[in-house]
Amino acid sequence: MRNADVRVGLLGFGTVGQGLVQGINLQSKEISRRIGAPLKIERALVQDVKKKRPVSLPELSTDARDILEDPEIDIVVEVMGGEHPAYAYVKQALEQRKQVVTANKLLLALHGLEFKALARLTGTGLLYEGSVLGGIPILRTIQRGLCGDRVEQIEGIFNGTTNFILSRMYDLGEDYLTALRLAQEAGYAEADPTMDVSGFDAACKLVILSRECFKVDVCLEDVTISGIEHLDKRQIAREKKLGRIPKLIARAKPQKAAIRVGVEWLPDTDLLSRVAGVQNALSLRTLIVGELFWRGPGAGGLATGGAVLADVMEAAERVLMERDETF
């Protein structure tokens, strides 16, 4: 007879994976009480098992088969990022009817429609709260809290790296390269920041949100994208005198032609203009409720790890329900 634990395999054990483990360690008793069984990280896929990490696990592996082909693992959590090999791993996990949790916005923007269809076909779960706005729990709000309403417009700041850079340029008069270097030193930007500063990261998140809000098959090709690389401090200084604040804004309406990411110059009366540093924000306009606004940490191990943990707990509840039905 199987152990009563719900067992989890991690594909990737970087910042988000370690944040997930930290969250489980901090809340282990409460998690067990909420879902009705202990939650156990069985093992994690890494590139180097000997690498020293601030958060440790007893079982590490360099072979994805140790997770994907282990019948004792109930939930596969993909937090490795990138398109490949994550695409093959997530597809295999769904085909094997494992519950899947991912925070990979690129993967979902490119293949989310395929994965959702496969999850329906196999009768398993695909959860991805951590892929959009980090610690802001927006997908559950849209899927459940607004299920009787209709979203008519999305706008927001979806990338903390670019918001940090723009905040430094506006508030302190720094040039783009200096602000970018400081973002990299602080761990907010990758060594290759292209995905962030080009607007592509925000576009991936906007695609995922647009699908949820508008129930349309939006693809990345439908998004008009521009980034922040072209801005210089002289231009920002001129606009500052006019009371205009630069932000990388993601906007969407149900029509595919109205989906875009780019720099906008906002008056200081706009709520989005007051979102500084690495924070993210989202404003929705709905048919019934009207204007709604969220603001919070959009990146970081604990913030995104917390969103992933919520998905893992929901997946664990599904696992336990299926066990009850089996017996």
Image (cartoon, helix red, strand yellow):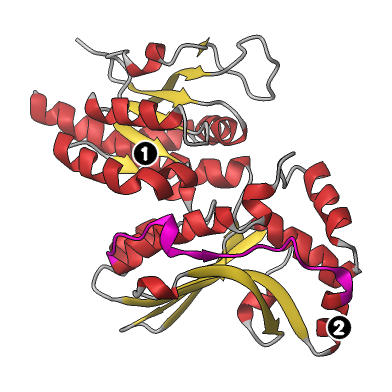
Residue 315 appears at what percent x and percent y?
31, 37
Crowd band around label 2 with a 10 angstrom C-alpha radius: few (<14), some (14–19), many (20+): few
Q: Where, by quadrant of the figure, is residue 242 drawn?
A: bottom right
Q: What residue is rendered at 27% in x and 14% in y?
A: 71
Residue 141 appears at what percent x and percent y?
37, 63
Dominant SS type (magenta): loop
317 over 61 or under it: above or below: below
Is 216 magenta? The answer is yes
Q: Please, what is the three-letter code of the amino acid marked with disc 1?
A: Met
Q: Secondary structure at mark 1?
A: helix
Residue most extreme to the bottom? 242
Q: What residue is rendered at 27% in x and 27% in y?
A: 98
Q: Please name which of the two marks, 1 or 2, marks the residue nearer to the observer.
A: 2
Q: Please, what is the three-letter code of the amino acid marked with disc 2?
A: Arg
**Sequence-wise first label, 1 or 2:** 2
- Viewed as shown, does residue 247 lie left or right of 290? right
- Viewed as shown, does residue 125 lie left or right of 232? left
> Could you say which is closer to the camera, residue 296 or residue 273?
273
Q: Which residue is mark 1?
A: 313
Q: Which residue is mark 2?
A: 238
Q: Secondary structure at mark 2?
A: helix
Of the 4 image quadrants, the one containing the C terminus is top left
* Magenta residue span: 215-234
- Viewed as shown, does residue 70 lie left or right of 43? left
